[in-house]
Amino acid sequence: MGDIFTNFFAGIVPLEAYMVVSLIMFFSGVYGFLSRKSLLMILISIELILNSIDINFAVFNRYLYPENMEGFFFALFTIAISACETAVAIAIVINIYRNLGHVEVDSLNELQEPAEVAENTEVSK
Amino acid sequence: MQYTLLILILPLLSFVVLGLMDTKWKPKVAGTIGTTVLGIVTLLSYYTAWMYFSSADISGTYQEIIPFQAEWLRFTDSLHINLGILLDPISVMMLVVISTVSLMVHIYSLGYMKGEKGFERYYAFLSLFTFSMLGLVLATNIFQMYIFWELVGVSSYLLIGFYYTKPEAVAASKKAFIVTRFADLFFLIGILFLSFYTKTFDFGILTSGDASVFASTAGVSFMGISVMSWAMALIFIGGAGKSAMFPLHIWLPDAMEGPTPVSALIHAATMVVAGVYLVARLFPVYVLYTPDVLHGIAYVGAFTSLFAAVIACVQTDIKRVLAFSTISQIGFMMVALGVSKMGGEEGLGYMAGMFHLFTHAMFKALLFLGAGSIIHAVHSNEMSKMGGLRKYMPFTHWTFLIACLAIAGIPPFSGFFSKDEILTAVFNFNPYFGALMTFTAGLTAFYMFRLYYNIFWGKEHKHAHTPHESPFAMLFPLIFLATVTVFAGWAIPFGNFVSSDGVAFHSELDMTTATISVVVALLSIALATVFYMKDSKTPAKLATTFSGLHKAASHRFYVDEVYMFITKKVIFNNISTPIAWFDRHVIDATMNGFANVTQWTSRRIKGFQSGEVQQYAFVILLGAIMIAALVIFV
């Protein structure tokens, strides 16, 4: 533990420090994804998760395989893909808003059979 | 003679068109179309009859002609069901009877049914019935006959239940259908027996007299009775159901709930004689291979005839009197066939039965149409609501009287000649039997004149409005049929046309029998005159003297009650109820159990499919953590 702080203040940032940041970002994202009610906030949480992964790619590449470039490219690809994914997701969110007037994710369970209908389909005796 | 196919196709077409158009056309249009088509069919039938009966070969024999035949279902090389048209003396005779009566009923209904709800439907059903009945008599094989047999049953059901808002009519139509269908079950079993052993359905082969056809039945017996007897007896049960022979007669009186012209057409002239026609059709088989069954038919016919005549004497509903009279007269025809033998003078009964079928169809249709005319004027079926109608309805009165004289057997009306032939045949068979039938004939005369006097004479009932004579559309059929009734007996040398072996013979009136039957008939009429012409106390006194018999007869000898007891108390309680319980509590319960278990399971596991994305994600996360934990710590 002592090494980390020594190195940190010496200007040498160790791999683990990046991992900590990335981990915090990832679980913030997961927490946001699980707890937020607004679709937009969930979308932002997903972006957070993706960014944490990007950091991982970059850091692993930089520290473990400095002679290769694949990690950076993967990070770039992920950014592009997440842009596309966000565009699609926003489109869906807008459509949901137009149709339902809100974007509360816990009331988006229309595909499920409503409880009162289920009661009525009891096999007739 | 390919054009005979039109005789079948035209009414069918008329049924389809009228049925499909239903109320889109005005009632008048529908009525006109139905009647016109029937007119054409009638002309074609007459033409066919003319052509056929002028085609006898030199020896005076009529050949069977099959102008059309197509294979329909092939089971084996020899056993196949054909659809075709068979012309022979009896089928051509029936063609004339059916088309004439049907045309008269069509015309009559234009007046009688005017303004009724469902007028178009009525005409569609009439066409369906005419088609089925014509198909029945023209069938080339027993299976085709069976198909049309069921079709006439259906059309009869539809027409009895024509006033479908009336509970009695619905009950009556159901009863008619179930009883005849029950009998048809035996008919079908009989057909299967017969065709299993003879390997054919074809009437031509069955009635050819070729013994090799029946070779395989030799020595085969069941419960000590040969299989041929079983088959023919079962087939007769089918005929008995349609022809209302005891104890399957119970549907016919109730069938009077239908419109009166329908009763005239179906339940007096045509459909109810289908059983007689069936026996006549298979007559060579009966007489050559199963004479015992044929004698059985004679006894059933005789008993039914007497039984129905007794009941007819005490009924008060005029249509029911006529219904029981019909049952009785069909009994006469069955007796005639039953006592007949093959060929020439020996086959007198056969010819007499067919002759009586012909004349009876005409005068019974006339009686029913007359009754319809009376009901039209009085708006009631009950005799007590009538009386003294002769002043108001002269045409109906005279035509009705002619028909009554005909059925009573007074010369020169047609019924005299045909009934005389029957009685002669029966006396030749067995004198005691002849005496019984003569007594029944006397009863016939008695109850017909009881009916006649109660309607047209006697004390006048106070009517809400003065009864009026019916419109011309209703009078024309009456006059036409009355004319036929006057002339048919002596103007048609019936033996020249119809005989048991197809060879024309000349039948003489047997003067002894004729004298006896006329004397008996006149005595009965005289008795009825004394009893009913004026208001007399004698009938009521007699009714109290023989109160047991009178009560039993007015309850139709409790046959309906016996049926009710057997079906409701015995069959329903002991067989149907346990089976229904088993069905409901075992079979249904098993199926319900499957469904309920499935539903219970799905309800328990459906929580997984909540549709909430975050829940899913949480589960995925937990899973991932568990896998990670496993990888790290294990």
Image (spheres, grey):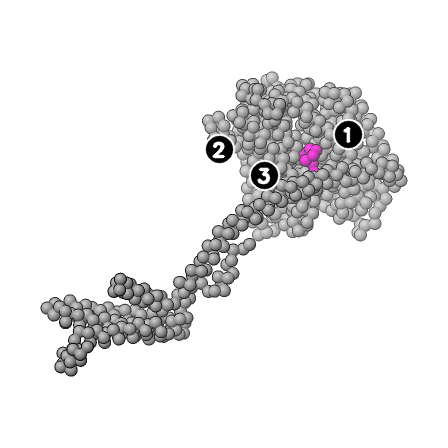
Residue at figure coordinates x 66%, y 37% from the top left: B101
- CA gap, disc 1 and disc 2: 46 Å
Q: Residue furthest bottom?
A: A9
> First in sequence: mark 3 or mark 2?
2
Three-letter amino acid code at the position of disc 2: Leu
All told, the count of numbered labels is 3
Label 2 Cα crowd, 10 Å radius (few <14 / some 14-19 / many 20+): few
> First in sequence: mark 1 or mark 2?
2
Compared across the picture, whether B58 is left or right of B261 comes to left
Q: Bounds of the magenta span? A: B243-252
* Residue that carries the numbered disc 2 in the rendered image: B73
> First in sequence: mark 1 or mark 3?
3
Residue at figure coordinates x 51%, y 58% from the top left: A122
Give the main secondary structure of the magenta stretch: loop
**In the rendered structure, does residue A71 fall within the stretch colored magenta?**
no
- Say what secondary structure mark 2 lies in: strand
Find out whether the residues at labels 1 and 2 contact each other: C-beta distance under 8 Å. no
Q: Is residue B447 visible?
A: yes
Compared across the picture, whether B513 is left or right of B283 comes to right
Q: Which mark is residue B151?
A: 3
Closer to the camera in the image, B504 or A114: A114
Image quarter where the C terminus of chain B lies is bottom left
Residue at figure coordinates x 65%, y 24% from the top left: B293
Image quarter where the N terminus of chain B lies is top right
- CA gap, disc 3 and disc 2: 19 Å
* Residue that carries the numbered disc 1 in the rendered image: B440
Quarter-of-image position of residue B608? bottom left
Q: Which of the chains bears the disc numbered 1?
A: B
Quarter-of-image position of residue B572? top right
